[in-house]
């Protein structure tokens, strides 16, 4: 089984980007917490843990992105979510779960703080605002999981893909745009096949709803995409 990373490097004098669960604490207290922990720089594709590994550590991302996913028995990858700088992952260890049930893998050069779950639980007891932040994260992720299950059960691929594009798009001078995702990435988020996702995207393009570039999708007709979501 994949073991948690070995910590070997002091975190230095700051936390990098504001860590969500610590953001209600005074800056000096945030920095003291970070100085007491250790960081690890990892390369792309580094595997932090996998299903069956002991769940004893919570990870806080200072730089980079981490992908959480599962694998089906047939070897199909199901993307759960991506975590980025300022966020945390592996938080279910706070509930004293015995084993991991997902993979956690860096998708670019990353730097994380690893905090033992018992230490975070103690901090949550001392600082109610930290406890509320952690519980908010858990609640949001549970809600998102339930929403995705509902979409899979009741919505078509076209409706789900339109909703995903609208959710992920960022404003640009030209049009709202989804950047940095391949067709395979989108398929993994939706829990479907890449070929199905590519076919649906091409249909959107033919109807004038989107423009497709390399890891770039411009949303040209927001109202039509919204109508697809409601269909």
Image (spheres, grey):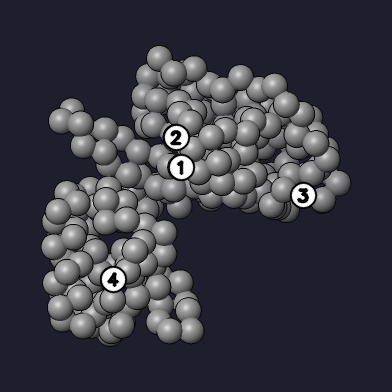
Residue 180 in the image: x percent, y percent?
41, 59
Kindly indicate the quadrant of the structure image that contains residue 111.
top right
* Extreme residue toward the front, this view: 214
Disc 1 and disc 4 in contact, CB within 8 angstroms: no
Residue highlighted by disc 2 = 45
Compared with 151, 37 (above or below) is: above
Q: Quadrant of the C terminus?
A: bottom left
The answer to whether 107 appears left or right of 94 in the picture is left
Residue highlighted by disc 4 = 212
Compared with 187, 134 (above or below) is: above
Measured Cα–Cα span from mark 1 to mark 2: 6 Å
Residue highlighted by disc 3 = 25
Q: Earlier in the sequence, mark 3 or mark 1?
A: 3
- Mark 4: few/some/many CA within 10 Å (<14, 14-19, 20+): some
- Label 1 vs label 4, nearer the camera: 4
Please report the residue visible at 48 percent of the width from the left and 31 percent of the height from the top. Answer: 46
- Label 3 vs label 1, nearer the camera: 1
Measured Cα–Cα span from mark 2 to mark 4: 27 Å
């Amino acid at each position: 089984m994949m073991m948690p990373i070995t910590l070997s490097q002091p975190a230095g004098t700051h936390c990098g980007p504001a860590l969500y669960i610590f953001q209600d604490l005074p800056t000096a207290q945030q920095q003291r917490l970070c100085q007491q922990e250790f960081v690890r720089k990892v390369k792309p594709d580094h595997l932090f843990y996998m299903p069956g590994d002991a769940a004893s550590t919570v990870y806080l991302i200072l730089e980079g992105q981490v992908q959480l996913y599962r694998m089906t028995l047939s070897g199909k990858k199901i993307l759960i979510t991506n975590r980025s700088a300022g966020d945390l992952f592996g938080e279910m260890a706070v509930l004293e779960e015995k084993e991991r049930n997902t993979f956690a893998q860096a998708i670019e050069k990353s730097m994380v703080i690893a905090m033992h779950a018992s230490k975070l639980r103690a901090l949550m007891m001392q600082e109610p605002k930290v406890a509320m932040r952690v519980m908010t994260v858990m609640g949001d992720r549970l809600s998102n999981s339930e929403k995705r299950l509902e979409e899979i059960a009741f919505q078509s691929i076209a409706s789900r893909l339109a909703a995903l594009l609208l959710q992920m798009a960022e404003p640009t001078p030209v049009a709202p745009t989804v950047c940095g995702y391949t067709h395979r990435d989108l398929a993994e988020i939706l829990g479907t096949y890449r070929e199905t996702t590519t076919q649906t995207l091409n249909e959107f393009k033919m109807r004038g709803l989107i423009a497709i570039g390399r890891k770039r999708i411009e949303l040209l007709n927001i109202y039509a995409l919204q109508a697809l979501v409601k269909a």
